[in-house]
Amino acid sequence: MRFAMRGQKKGIVCGSLVVFLVLGVFGGHTDQEAQVFLKDILPVVEEMKTFGSSQTYFPESLFEYINGAAEIYLSYDFKELIVAEYKKSDSSDSIAVEIYDMGNHKNSFGIYSAERYPDNEFLILGTQGYMEEGALNFLVGRYYVKLLCFDCEDRSVKWLRSFSEGIVNRVENKEGFPVYLKTLPKEGQIPNTEKFILRNVMGYKFLHDGYFVSYKMKDLSFDCFLIEGKNPEEATEMLKKYLEAKGAASVQKIPLGFQIKDRYYHNIYLAQVDNILCGVMKISDGFEEIGERYIAKLIESVKMADE
């Protein structure tokens, strides 16, 4: 079946998160009501009819569909996938539809952000979407949707837009980007580099719910990040474990928090605001002023968001 082509592609693009994730298998069955609802999101498009019956996959069976990429989806608590194919009766045009239910809008953004590139051709569609040759991937609420047009020639854009709009209109809860992304400083931010990492942030099992974005300023490329604890006590514990992992010799107390020397991320600046750890990393020697300025920006922004 032609859907197998999608798994090969995903296996390539998912490598970008290896530095952050130690992948594992998570998730479980959704109930029967959720299955019916996911089928209800499948679009109805004039001139195109479903070809055969739709297929559903759950955490324990996702490997059957995207063997090379299933682990990264499972690491974001994947719930269910529905796959359907549509064909036009009087031509060879066909569309493959994949709708991934990731459980909530943070997890759907997480897997979407792992597969997009900053230079993609982005669209205002749902939360966000991007077009590739003969394909359209987009995010709407808790769902990550992939459309692939086969043998559509110059009609691809027409079909992809019709199907995507049909799906968006059927989703009731259209939650946008995770709210904490709005608190990350805008100055110097590289558009469309935001990421959400659910667990094993920076390779540490005790760090979870991390929001990252990349920056470029002068001759320096660096990242800002937020790590969300369930409460201030958990955030304090995460901070304590991280500083212990880095070792006392690498950690220096500064007025706003901590400065950490790291062989991979150079200078790291870290501070706690309530249940949030604010951080700046990849600050090369000689650019410490930028690290100090951005950790101050993060602290102020998080405090304002909590008011």
Image: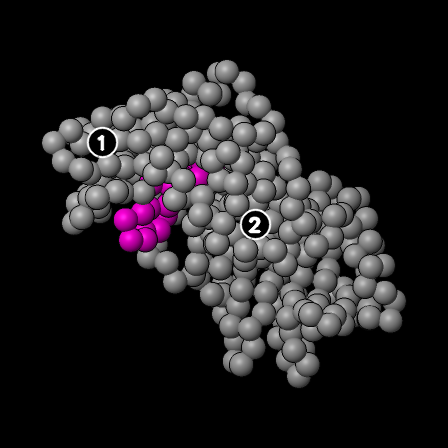
Q: Position of residue 85 (x, y in %)?
A: 31, 31
Residue stretch rendered in magenta on the structure: 129-147
Give the left or right position of residue 173, taking residue 285 as reference: left
- Residue at screen point 67% across, 61% down: 279
Relative to the observer, which residue lies in front, 155 or 262? 155
- Residue at screen point 65% across, 67% down: 281
Relative to the observer, which residue lies in front, 124 or 231? 124
* Magenta residue check for 142: yes
Relative to the observer, which residue lies in front, 91 or 168? 91
Main secondary structure type of the part rendered in magenta: strand
Which amino acid, by three-letter code, is at mark 1? Lys
Task: Work out how far the residue at label 2 is from the one at label 1, CA to CA, in angstroms.
Answer: 36 Å
**Mark whose residue sits in front, 2 or 1:** 1
Quadrant for residue 99, please give it. top left
Q: Which residue is mark 2?
A: 196
- Residue at screen point 48% across, 54% down: 12
Q: Which mark is residue 118?
A: none
Q: Exactly how many numbered labels are in the figure?
A: 2
Q: Which residue is mark 1?
A: 87
Relative to the observer, which residue lies in front, 55 or 202? 55
Residue at far front of view: 1
Residue at far top of view: 32
- Residue at screen point 50% across, 16% down: 32
* Element on which disc 2 rests: strand
Q: Is residue 134 above or below residue 140?
A: below
Q: What colour scheme governs how the chains and residues are painted in the rendered image of this protein? A: one colour
Q: Position of residue 153 (x, y in %)?
A: 18, 48
* Element on which disc 1 rests: strand
Report crowding for label 2: few under 14, some 14 to 19, many 20 or more residues within 10 A (C-alpha).
many
* Magenta residue check for 277: no
